[in-house]
Image: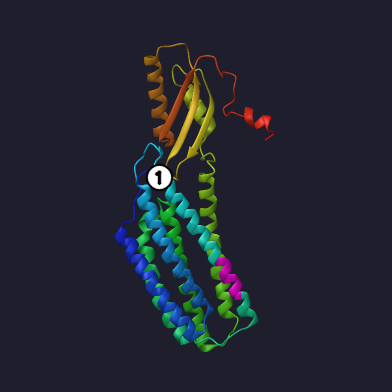
Amino acid sequence: MHQQNVTGKRFLAVTILNIIITVVELIGGVISGSLALLSDAFHNFGDSASIVISYFAQVIGKRPETSKQTYGYKRAEILSALLNALLLVTIAIGLLVEAVKRFQHPTHINGEVMLIVAVVGLIANFASAALLHAGSHDSLNIKATYLHVLSDALSSLAVIVAAIILIFVNIPWLDPLLTVAVAIYIAWEAWPIIKQTLHILMQAAPQLDYDAIIHDLEQIDGVIGVHHIHAWSVDEHHVMFSLHINCHDIKLSEAEVIYSKIEDLLRNKYNICHITIQAECDRGRNETMFDTVDDEKHGI
């Protein structure tokens, strides 16, 4: 799968845009008295930090394999995605706390100032989202940053609607209610990234049809049985796979032919990029697909 990398210039442009938005919304939030604007300002400040983290993670992730990092540095982007998603959740919790305080102590909101600042924020956030959109489909790291920016754009849109209402009608609870809605949305978008990154970092098995894999492998001439399978992901694109096969007592050169067929099958049909195969005659022939001996000993 081809992965599109977001260039350093785009990261820099998005960072500058977010810093501008943060300053404008801080000033506008203080003048208008809008908690929604102030919370969005802090959210944008968090975005700026996450964008910088994402950029350096992408740079580190491109570094080649070494004797100390034989799988390379691809996990740097996964760690960055997790950090950014956790930052989103932290921001959401902070917004909820401040919204509760504002419900208890409502203040007058200047709708005109709130509207002008929100429009500026909306334009800048959509521009940032457009710059990051290309890489958001292929990288959890970029996706986490993209969601940071997109959530800001959507919150700016919601602030615009609220500002228009507040210009004509004084509704003290509308501003904190909007803040609560934005906070819930941010947490909702962050959760799938947290779940997927933890899944990868815990080396949980990727979603593969293992029964179909076994069936296909056993159709290969020379393969008698398949057992002791392990599968894990380095990142969201690179699946690692190891397996033991049973075959007749053949020459190593003949085993290599079988290896090549197995590798072609797993790479082309199941998108597995790194495959380790161990051939055996009789050992392990009665074992199951997955090695459950250790688990059973520990009562798992």
Q: Residue at x 46, y 63 (%)?
A: 148
Q: Residue at x 42, y 74 (%)?
A: 22
Q: Is residue 288 above or below residue 58?
A: above
Q: Farthest residue toward the right?
A: 299
Q: Nearer the viewer, residue 34 or 82?
A: 82
**Residue at which label 1 appears:** 73
Colouring scheme applied when the structure was drawn = rainbow
The answer to which image quadrant residue 25 occupies is bottom left
Image quadrant where one finds the C terminus: top right
Residue 289, image x, y percentages: 57, 27
Three-letter amino acid code of the residue under disc 1: Tyr
Image quadrant where one finds the N terminus: top left
Q: Is residue 59 magenta?
A: no
Residue 113, image x, y percentages: 45, 85
Residue 215, image x, y percentages: 51, 26
Q: Is residue 289 above or below residue 273?
A: above
Residue count near mark 1 (Cα–Cα under 10 Å), binned few <14, some 14–19, many ≥20: many
Q: Residue at x 65, y 80 (%)?
A: 104
Q: Is residue 96 magenta?
A: yes
Q: Which residues are magenta?
A: 92-99
Q: Residue at x 48, y 30 (%)?
A: 242
Q: Farthest residue toward the left?
A: 9
Residue 204, image x, y percentages: 54, 41
Residue 173 placement, left or right of 123: right
